[in-house]
Image (cartoon, helix red, strand yellow):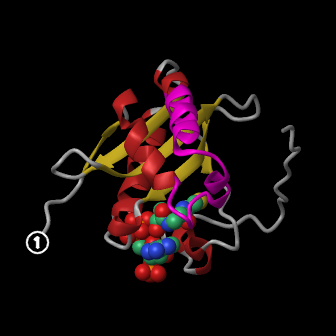
Amino acid sequence: MSTPLTIRLARLEDANDITAIIREPDVVPRLASETVETTRAHVAAQLARCLADDSHRVYVAQDDTGRVMGYVAVHWLPYLIHSGPEGYVSELFVHSEARGQGLGKRLLDVVIQEARERGGSRLQLVNFRTRESYQRGFYTQAGWEERPDAASFVLPLL
Ligand SMILES: CC(C)(COP(=O)(O)OP(=O)(O)OC[C@H]1O[C@@H](n2cnc3c(N)ncnc32)[C@H](O)[C@@H]1OP(=O)(O)O)[C@@H](O)C(=O)NCCC(=O)NCCS
């Protein structure tokens, strides 16, 4: 039986492994149009911003060789209408070689634990309906509720 992966806070050196995860074809397909160096550069730059600011957290799961096989990013938003911060889970990705073994659930549990420690009011995320994770009910099985009354909007700027 393989050793369970260890979850820890991300470090800048994790940028390479995170790049490999998000460049898998079914994770962020549009990244195929840029070079791996470009992806690595923006991962490293955004990770550095997260590490420098307590309102952002990135957790990674590493195997016993130190390779990062999954990560979650959460951003603590001080909504004026809530008594505690709302956590926005912007990214949760597990390498295809490590999926279906409970790692995604463990990474979410770490975020929920941090939310409790921060006196958080709520967590939220966007899960595209085209994703296998949505179709297999990954978040509803973990207790998350899909909001029937809210539409998700974006204003593309690039
Ligand atoms: C969704 C994801 C984070 C779940 O992590 P995981 O470690 O595979 O999940 P766990 O082992 O903790 O939980 C198992 C559940 O995950 C989902 N899951 C498992 N393998 C999956 C896969 N290859 N693709 C998508 N979802 C999968 C299923 O809902 C599964 O439950 P089921 O077996 O009852 O159908 C991970 O599979 C992944 O990164 N998928 C691709 C990208 C993605 O959809 N990310 C979420 C963006 S919001």
Nearest the eye: 115 or 135 = 135
Q: Which residue is labeled 1 in the image? A: 1
Residue 143 visible in image: no
Q: Please identify the quarter of the rendering in which residue 8 is found.
A: top left
Give the answer, above or below, for where 95 lies relative to 82: below
Give the answer, above or below, for where 55 lies relative to 74: above
Query: Within the magenta stretch, is there residue 127?
Result: no
Q: Which image quarter holds the C terminus? A: top right
The residue that appears at 85% across and 48% down in the rendered structure is: 154
Q: Residues within 10 Å of mark 1 (few under 14, many from 20)?
A: few
Q: Please identify the quarter of the rendering in which residue 127 is found.
A: bottom right
Nearest the eye: 30 or 105 = 30
Query: Within the magenta stretch, is there residue 37?
Result: yes
Instruction: Tell me if 70 is positioned left or right of 6 in this view.
Output: right
Nearest the eye: 149 or 64 = 64
Give the answer, above or below, for where 141 lies relative to 119: below
Span colored in magenta:
23-47
